[in-house]
Amino acid sequence: MLFGLVAWATTLKYVLSAERLVIFAPSSMTDVLNRVAVDYENQSGVKVLFSFSGTAQLARQLEYGAPADVFITADGEWMKWAIDRQLVEHHAVSPIAGNQLVVAARNEVENWENIEILLTQTRFAMAEPNAVPAGRYAKQALISRGIWDKAAKQAVFGDNVRVTLRRLALGEVAAAIVYESDVSVEPTVKTIHTFPTNIHEPIVYWSAKVNRSKVGGNFINFLKNATARPIFKQFGFLPPPSGAALPDKGN
């Protein structure tokens, strides 16, 4: 009988370890979620697979039927979009992190005293502003500064914020508007300016269990527990803003 129990336990462990969890997440969370997944896999025995890209691209893939268990967005607009199309369970949506919008430059560059001059007279990179959350936040900040029209003529737009960061790291542009968390994982760049949080919408990352998923909720709960919180902080993320709420209207 003891042998039978051991065999059953071994079989159960194998079955659980064979489970898969598919996460759709924004590119800005690549490093932190890969690190969180290590702890989750060790505790649960469930293998975590990621698809990292721009939030807009992931949302469209979800709409076209791509299989996933958890959908994480870099803003509330795209999460509301997914809720409106019944792609995720609306009652299981929750904020998991915040961030800061910054201007970054390569380490060897001296700090600019006038960010407005930098962003209106030199080539800089930012995410595409019509669909990508990082680009949307950046455009809002530049409009608030009264320099959007001039800055847009100097901007090199990217499909996601990591494309933007890469262009700066390669020296293709003089600066880039990215998240503080992006700067923390790229050793060749530094933050030279942090935008005040009151000149753009609050930066909130939202998570939700995809409809029909049986295992997504466990991972979302893990993202919010005491084990994951310090990891988010280590990678430059903030706690979600107090009172974070989804927009009333979708895209």
Image: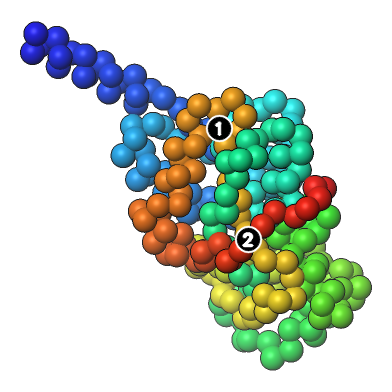
Tell me the amino acid under the disc marked 2.
Answer: Ala
Above or below, comparing residue 183 to residue 3 in the picture: below
Q: Quadrant of the N terminus?
A: top left
Categorize mark 1 by other alpha carbons within 10 Å: few (<14), some (14-19), many (20+): many
Res. 32 visible in picture: yes
Which amino acid lies under the numbered mark 1 shown in the image of this protein? Asp
Q: Residue at x 51, y 64 (%)?
A: 239
Q: Which mark is residue 244?
A: 2
SS category of the residue bearing label 2:
loop
- Comparing 66 with 157, the one in front is 66
- Other-residue count near label 2 (Cα within 10 Å), few / some / many at <14 / 14–19 / ≥20: some
Label 1: element kind:
loop
Can you say whether 3 is above or below 164 in the image? above
Image spot of residue 7 (x, y percent)? 18, 13
Which of the pair 221/11 is nearer the observer? 221
For marks 2 and 1, the one nearer the N-term is 1
Image position, residue 147 (x, y; %) = 86, 78
- The reply to whether dot 2 and dot 1 touch (C-beta < 8 Å) is no
Instruction: Specify whether 107 is left or right of 53.
Output: left
Which quarter of the picture shows residue 246? bottom right
